[in-house]
Amino acid sequence: MKHYLSSGIAASLLLGSASFAFAASELTIESWRNDDLSIWQETILPAFMKAHPDIKIKFTPTAPVQYNAALNAKLEGGTAGDLITCRPFDGSLDLYSKGYLKNLKGMATLDNFPDSAKGAWSTDDGSATFCVPMAAVIHGFIYNKDAFAEIGVEPPKTQAEFMAVLEKIKEDGNYIPMAMGTLDQWESAAMGYQNIGPMYWKGEEGRKAIVAGTGKLTDEGWVKPFEVLASWGPYLGDGYEAQSYPDSQTLFTLGRAAIYPSGSWEIAGFNRDADFKLGAFRPPLPAEGDSCYISDHTDIGIGLNAASPNAEAAMKFLEWMGTKEFAELYSNAVPGFFSLSKHEISLSDPLADEFISWRKDCQSTNRSAAQIVSRGTPNLWNEMWVVSANVINGKQSPQDAANQLQKGLSSWYEPQMD
Amino acid sequence: MIEVEQDLMVSERKKKPFRWHVLVFLAPAVIVYTMIMILPLAETLRFSFFQRDTTTQVVSFVGFENYIKLFFDPYWVEPFLNSLWNNCYFFLIHMLVQNPIGVLIAALLSMVHLPGKKLYRTAIFMPTLLSFVVVGFVWKLMLSPLWGVSKGLMKSVGLGSWYLPFLGKEETALTTLSLISVWQFIGIPMMLIYAALLSIPDEVIEAAECDGVTGISQFFKIKLVLILPTIGIISILTFVGNFNAFDLIYTTQGPLAGPNFSTDLLGTILYRTFYGQQLQPGDPNMGAAIATVMFFIILTGVAIYLFFIQRKLTRYEM
């Protein structure tokens, strides 16, 4: 019996080391993007392996909802892949502070990315960067080109023009001017406040001031966007208070609404569902001649597993991720998720191309509640959901909403305490 | 005589054998119950006395700090009281609507000459079998101002101007959800009361009729009195169910229980705190504190019922 047992252990050890040896010749990427599996297998990875025939890479995604838990378990057990797909901000910062991700600071490829992109995967003081930025989603407005032509309006450039367009569509009466609801609340904050807000709080400048404690959420730049939101209510269609996110999407793709305040992640779905021509315009400028800021929210990055036995090969892949080739390949394969690199790339999808073209004249920024300021209670991002919906519903004044956010933040966030 | 005495002495000296079978038969229930009920409850209690440091990630004993935060920090006590009040309101609507309607339906069903009785009974009981997710989704769709049938239905009976986006207004959302919940669960009180009504012996009814108590007054003076204990049980079951409610709110209004927390219940607050959501990290220790408070609220409610109400209910031998 003993004999069998020990030989069994020996055999399993052998097998174990054999599989380990096998893994060593091949890199694995951990990811939650199981939607993109075929894109990685058929487009992105073959392109890399053609240039580096000595390296083999496998893309092994987990379902999005299980990703965090599964990844943590694998990292703790030492069985995680060599390359780790990183969620932005606190999610992956946590992995870095636990020592699971390698500090990539000093990698040449990181110079290909703007600071706003690197910020999502850097420590609070910026001393370490632990993931190479991969993709972002851009906020803006998607509109029904056919409806615009029918009514005879042009995509607006300034806030005043925007309101005029809304008014005209309403007068025409054939379309709901804008498809948005307040039931799910996050629409109001993400598609509303974070969409148009950067124009008023001046993008990174305003966001960083809040993080540093030099700016307050009650400053004009943070109250103004609420005032704009408050003026949206009458143009959102009957019963928008009980309209959910999928309702808004359907309302727009059925051609019943003319404008959809949104972001680039909708592109693939809208291209599939809508049978009219789609266009996009960026958040309207507060006034003619103002400088332009867009919410270019960092969404995906890739980092190196600190325990990876193939660090050298993995670094080669990370270096490649900073090239124009990768940027173009990826952004074209997954329309609406844009490479974060500084390279100027062209996209075959006209709608996606419109969105990414804004980077040329606008400055990119992250969602203002994403970094650091949503770590405590009350949670700033959650509060933004609630007050944005309240403002649109006319239940709270813009100033009141801003006061509530500031009061909540300053109750736990030290730089904001008086 | 002596022999008998000796026999007794022998049997006394003989030790009674330990009755192992009692232990053996009790063990599975005790083990399972301990594992899935008592241990988690004790763990929850223990957990609520700890807290994790956000920077060092070290979990340490903090005593009653979580509870002090929950009851005295305005950022905790306000939402907590709000949800507690909402919970009471939710329960109140159930009591006011569910019990009378349940009694009414049961009374109608217990009438002998009702055609299609079984069909009604099944149809009314049906929603109880549905999952919360289905109920939430179906009602959200029906009440939707965009695609829902409710607007058209109300218009067709001349109530079109009364139509509101019921789930999206602070004033109406919680009431609407309470009524949906009543709709879903009315089957259980109906069946229990129906069974109670059927178990009233014919002699009692006949005696009442002899005394000239018939019709409506017979129902109120005889039948209702006899089914009061059943209504009591239903009420306490509803109380426990309502104060643990979460699923319906979550599926229709999301974890933030909108609009503006007007539908926030203890269950949703617990969920948000324990698991976190979006950018808010979960706080299992604080969550455990809330769960413990919820447990004691429910325990108090049940105790009040058992000691003060159930004792006063007169039971009649039937």
Image (cartoon, rainbow, N blue to C red):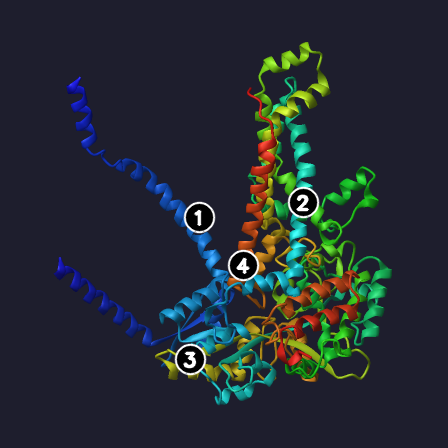
Amino acid type at circle 3 is: Lys
Residue A136, x across and y down, in percent: 59, 75
Viewer-side residue, A308 vs A50 = A308
For the residues carrying marks 3 and 4, which lies nearer the camera in this image? 4
Q: Which mark is residue A50?
A: 3
Per the model, the C-alpha gap separating discs 1 and 2 is: 29 Å
Per the model, the C-alpha gap separating discs 3 and 4 is: 56 Å
The residue labelled by disc 4 is B289
Per the model, the C-alpha gap separating discs 3 and 2 is: 62 Å
Mark 2 residue element: helix
- Chain letter for mark 4: B
Amino acid type at circle 2 is: Ser
Amino acid type at circle 1 is: Met
For the residues carrying marks 4 and 2, which lies nearer the camera in this image? 4
Note whether A321 is above or below A17 in the view shown. below
Mark 4 residue element: helix
Q: Which mark is residue B178?
A: 2
For the residues labelled 3 and 4, say whether their Cβ atoms are less than 8 Å apart: no
Note whether B243 is above or below A23 in the view shown. above
Residue at the spot x=64%, y=83% of the render?
A212
Mark 1 residue element: helix
